[in-house]
Image (tube, rainbow, N blue to C red):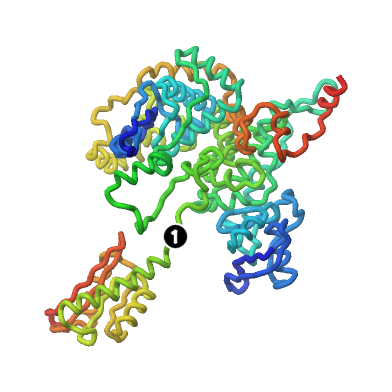
């Protein structure tokens, strides 16, 4: 098929920058990475990009296509060629460009290291002398986070990092959750204290770009939410973000609706709130502050209050509260709402069902 | 049968916290527009905050139950749809709804808890949709076309979408989070150069003056490319054009007065000078003025 790409060429040594168009013939199954290989091989050997595995596991070929971060090896070009579209390929965002599509990953790795990306053993050896075994339920807590291949696509798109380059960012925090959620790790509190500092978990703006772009289904934003929940569960709540969150909880169980007027003093403190009195006065002039501090109370708010008491007794606090929804939400990824595996594998065009020992046992029986 | 004669569709209306107070315009405009686009709003009473991103993050299990309670009361109205007006509420409620719909065990546990505190059970059958979606497609869109006083054709907009009405797209599922509106910078450039020239020519014609008579030309200082293009098109020699965008940038409504002050200060404006001024700007509006300068040049 006939293909064309526009590629942003850049040389950090000279500062030269140019958008160059390349036309070439590519097989119908070609990925973006295959196309770049063709360009480099047949048209311009000076084109720089990273690659290694070609099968979505090494995380080398993160880049942007039409402004959105992708793994080049995961991106099939057939539909784009059919539309006659000429996509613009550029380096990932939020990281300095070295040459063409190659970015400097040093800032990425330094944040990665800041998370202590290793296990701090804190478990007792099983009495039977065998290896430590993790239950499926506990494995579910870190399953998605374990899928990360460090490609940087989430970092490329992170809005919070664009405004604060020191923000730890979605990849590092997802990696942090992978250890916080590991029952063998003995440094949970120390880790959470560290991740709760400035540029940490509460600086996420919840824009969900990382979830949108992650090519591996890690859902870094959800990992950050799990870290937030674990912090609150363990009483690590000095950060303004944590106080902000706690005020929503307090509002829900007292009046039902958000007690907006008190949100700033409860989050930033009374000194900061006094400095913003002028803004408050302007809100009041427009009827946006209730004149007397009479809370706007929802009907039957006692139900919401009792509901909190009931759920807090059921041991789904912290990350477990997020994990319990993942099974259902994963169905959206795969475009079905079905409960039965048979039904899924029977759909036309479905992949063959993988071999599992219990199936064989069923067949024998 | 015209769309306005068909009965209104009843929807459970969840306005959330901010539309109740600091963003109350959202509530009042929703209530004004809804009947015009075929919706009858059944306002929910026994509902609370959805928890925003905050309770979702801090106490996820409580978040799920608060939202399940809202969904249960929406279902109790007999409406098939729960309509939201806030992006954050929309994500929270849709997400909780998918969690409950896709996991029978979880739904059973949540319903048991709801029952304990006296809330009706939720079957999982309500659909959560944003008000904007109701007027962006389907019958709402058809009715909007009927009641809109002015069409939107050619309207130039600077969109701010907000994050959570688009993402995560698997939960929102309404539009492609990447390709929504086309930026039309080239069209703005073409428009600006066209009106700078045509409105200047019109004012000269009406006053019976010609381009050669213009001593000083002060266009709006948006960017030099637009000014250069217009100057060349009009045929005004470049020494008669006042440009200060290179020093002050685009100062919007201040740009022509500032440029006049510069021209007065450096002696280009003299008593008796014929000054041509053309502005264009927001909303894509434009206008020209021709003026005989009376102030003596600066000493």
Determine whether, in the image, residue A23 is placed left or right of residue B78. right
Q: Residue at x 37, y 36 (%)?
A: A264
Determine whether, in the image, residue B23 is placed left or right of residue A148. left
Q: In which quadrant of the rendered view does residue B258 lie?
A: bottom left
Q: Residue at x 51, y 48 (%)?
A: B177
Q: Chain of mark 1?
A: B
Q: Answer whether residue A110 is visible to the viewer in this image.
A: yes
Q: Where does label 1 land, which residue? A: B183
Q: Residue A2's spot in the image, x, y percent?
A: 67, 65
Which one is nearer the viewer's eye here, B280 or A180? B280
Determine whether, in the image, residue A73 is placed left or right of residue B84. right
Q: Residue at x 57, y 18 (%)?
A: B109
Which one is nearer the viewer's eye here, A267 or B49? B49
Q: Residue B292's spot in the image, x, y percent?
A: 14, 79
Q: In which quadrant of the rendered view does residue A37 lie?
A: bottom right
Q: Residue B205's spot in the image, x, y percent?
A: 19, 79
Q: Residue B204's spot in the image, x, y percent?
A: 20, 79
The single residue placed furthest to the left in the displayed view is B294
Q: Answer whether residue B23 is visible to the viewer in this image.
A: no
Label 1 crowd bin: few (<14), some (14–19), many (20+), radius 10 Å: few
Q: Residue at x 40, y 41 (%)?
A: B132
The local secondary structure at tag 1 comes to loop
Q: Is residue B163 above or below residue A86?
A: above
Query: For the C terminus of chain B, which image quadrant?
Result: bottom left
Query: For the N terminus of chain B, which image quadrant?
Result: top left
Q: Is residue B189 above or below residue A31?
A: below
Q: In which quadrant of the rendered view does residue B12 lie?
A: top left
């Amino acid at each position: 098929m006939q293909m064309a790409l526009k590629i942003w060429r850049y040389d950090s040594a000279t500062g030269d920058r140019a958008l160059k168009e390349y036309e070439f013939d590519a097989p119908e199954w070609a990925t973006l990475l295959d196309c770049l290989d063709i360009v480099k091989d047949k048209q311009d050997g000076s084109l720089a990009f990273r690659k290694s595995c070609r099968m979505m596991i090494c995380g080398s070929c993160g880049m942007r296509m039409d402004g959105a971060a992708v793994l080049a090896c995961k991106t099939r070009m057939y539909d784009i060629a059919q539309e006659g579209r000429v996509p613009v390929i550029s380096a990932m965002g939020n990281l300095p460009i070295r040459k063409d599509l190659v970015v400097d990953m040093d800032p990425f790795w330094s944040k990665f290291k800041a998370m202590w990306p290793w296990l701090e053993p804190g478990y007792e050896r099983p009495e039977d002398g065998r290896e430590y075994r993790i239950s499926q339920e506990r494995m579910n807590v870190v399953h998605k986070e374990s899928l990360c291949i460090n490609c940087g696509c989430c970092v490329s798109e992170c809005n919070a990092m664009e405004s604060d380059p020191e923000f730890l960012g979605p990849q590092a925090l997802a990696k942090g959750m992978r250890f916080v959620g590991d029952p063998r790790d003995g440094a949970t509190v120390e880790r959470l204290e560290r991740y709760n500092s400035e540029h940490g978990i509460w600086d996420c703006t919840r824009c969900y770009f990382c979830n949108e772009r992650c090519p591996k289904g890690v859902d870094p934003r959800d990992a950050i939410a799990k870290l937030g929940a674990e912090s609150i569960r363990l009483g690590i709540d000095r950060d303004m973000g944590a106080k902000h969150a706690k005020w929503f909880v307090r509002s829900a169980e007292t009046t039902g609706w958000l007690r907006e007027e008190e949100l700033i003093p409860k989050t930033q403190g009374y000194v900061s709130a006094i400095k913003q009195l002028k803004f408050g006065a302007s809100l009041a002039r427009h009827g946006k502050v209730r004149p007397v501090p009479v809370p706007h109370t929802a009907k039957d708010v006692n139900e919401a209050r009792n509901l909190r008491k009931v759920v807090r007794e059921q041991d789904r606090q912290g990350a477990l509260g997020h994990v319990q929804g993942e099974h259902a939400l994963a169905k959206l990824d795969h475009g079905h709402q079905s409960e039965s595996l048979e039904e899924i594998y029977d759909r036309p065009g479905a992949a063959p069902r993988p071999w599992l020992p219990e199936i064989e046992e069923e067949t024998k029986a | 049968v015209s769309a306005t004669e068909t009965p209104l569709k009843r929807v459970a209306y969840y306005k959330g916290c901010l539309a109740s107070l600091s963003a109350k315009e959202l509530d009042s405009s929703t209530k004004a527009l809804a009947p015009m686009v075929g919706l009858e709003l059944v306002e929910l009473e026994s509902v609370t905050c959805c928890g925003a991103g905050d309770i979702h993050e801090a106490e996820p299990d409580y978040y799920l139950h608060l939202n399940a309670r809202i969904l249960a009361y929406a279902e109790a109205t007999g409406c098939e749809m729960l309509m939201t007006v806030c992006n954050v509420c929309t994500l929270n409620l849709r997400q909780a709804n998918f969690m409950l719909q896709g996991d029978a065990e979880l739904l059973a546990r949540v319903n048991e808890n709801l029952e304990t505190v006296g809330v009706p059970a939720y079957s999982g059958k309500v659909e959560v949709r944003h008000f904007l979606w109701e007027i962006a497609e389907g019958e709402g869109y058809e009715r909007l076309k009927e009641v809109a006083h002015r069409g939107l054709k050619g309207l130039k907009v600077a969109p701010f979408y907000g994050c959570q009405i688009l993402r995560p797209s698997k939960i929102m599922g309404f539009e492609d989070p990447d390709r929504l509106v086309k930026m039309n910078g080239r069209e703005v450039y073409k428009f600006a150069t066209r009106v700078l020239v045509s409105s200047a020519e019109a004012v000269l014609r009406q006053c019976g003056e010609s381009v050669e008579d213009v001593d000083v030309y002060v266009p709006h200082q948006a960017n030099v490319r637009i000014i250069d293009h217009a100057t060349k098109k009009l045929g005004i020699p470049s020494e008669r054009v006042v440009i200060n965008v290179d020093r002050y940038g685009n100062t919007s409504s201040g740009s022509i007065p500032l440029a006049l002050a510069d021209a007065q200060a450096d002696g280009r404006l003299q008593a008796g000078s014929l000054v041509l001024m053309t502005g264009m700007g927001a909303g894509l509006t434009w206008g020209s003025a021709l003026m005989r300068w009376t102030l003596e040049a600066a000493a």
